[in-house]
Image: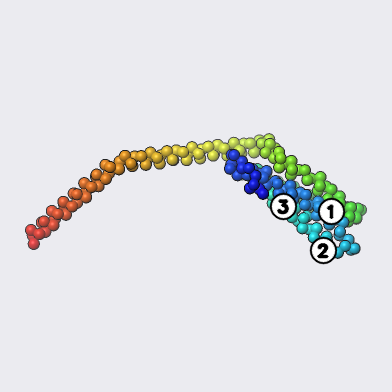
Amino acid sequence: MINAHAADPATGKPPPEAGVSAVCIASILIPVGEIWFAWTCTPNVHWIVPILAGIPFGAGNTGIFIYASNYLVHSYGIYAASALAGNAVLRSILGGTMPLAGPAMYAALGPHWAGTLLALLEAICIPIPFVFYRYGGKIRMKSALIRSMQEDKERDERKRSRYAEKQAAEGERRAEAEVEAGPGMEAGVAMDEVADMVARDKGAGRDAEKA
């Protein structure tokens, strides 16, 4: 699905936003699994039903974690480690503080409506990956850091291209020089071979006279 996107002319590969297409699907699976679990996690419903809600919920979480991280890596290039570190810090802060309110929320609203509230909050976030999928390229180019990184990358590619062209030109000149020098070199080799044969014949004659 990602490779089916049109390649970026500058890199020849799918743009970073191509990976966000998977995030768009995953963002829908999370609230679906959440609301499914919220209204089936009671004793009057067979235990397998809420357990199965973990499939879309887990798939959505995994998809967002993987492909959103990939999007950061492809967007920030050599600064990807800093981008992932900032993402990890924010995620850890939210992961550490949200559970403090969880027990009180479930006690006040009950399992059905507490889960429904979480599903609504997750549904509100669904448009975010769609916005990045559609306008991510323009949003990235508004970053001075990414623009500078892109310019440096393009300069390096131009240097490599000029170096490759220079090496190719030098190779062609060497090949032409070898072709032009070919007949003279062959004649020189033939003369050397004749001289060696004459020397060998003279040596054989002297040996015969001594015998």
**Circle 1: residue type:** Ile
- Residue at the spot 92% in from the left edge and 53% down from the top edge: 108
Residue 69 visible, this orientation: no
Taking the spot 84% from the left edge, 64% from the top edge, the residue there is 47
Dot placed on the residue nearer the N-terminal end, 3 or 1: 1
Q: CA distance from mark 3 to mark 2?
A: 23 Å
Three-letter code, disc 2:
Ile
Q: Secondary structure at mark 3?
A: helix
| Secondary structure of residue under mark 1 | helix
- The secondary element bearing badge 2 is classed as helix
Residue located beneath label 1 in the image? 35
Q: Position of residue 106 (x, y in %)?
A: 88, 55
Q: Quadrant of the C terminus?
A: bottom left
Rendered image quadrant of residue 127: top right
Percent coordinates x, y for residue 126 in the rendering: 78, 45
The residue indicated by pointer 2 is 48
- Numbered tag placed on residue 100 in the rendering: none
Residue placed furthest toward the right: 108
Per the rendering, the mark at residue 63 is: 3
Specify whether 113 is left or right of 94.
Answer: right
Q: Nearer the viewer, residue 61 or 88?
A: 61
Q: Are marks 1 and 2 in contact (CB under 8 Å)?
A: no
Q: Nearer the viewer, mark 3 or mark 2?
A: 2
The correct choice, above or below, for 107 with respect to 139 in the image is below
Q: CA distance from mark 1 to mark 2?
A: 15 Å
Residue for point 86% across, 59% down: 40
Image location (x, y in percent) of residue 91: 75, 49
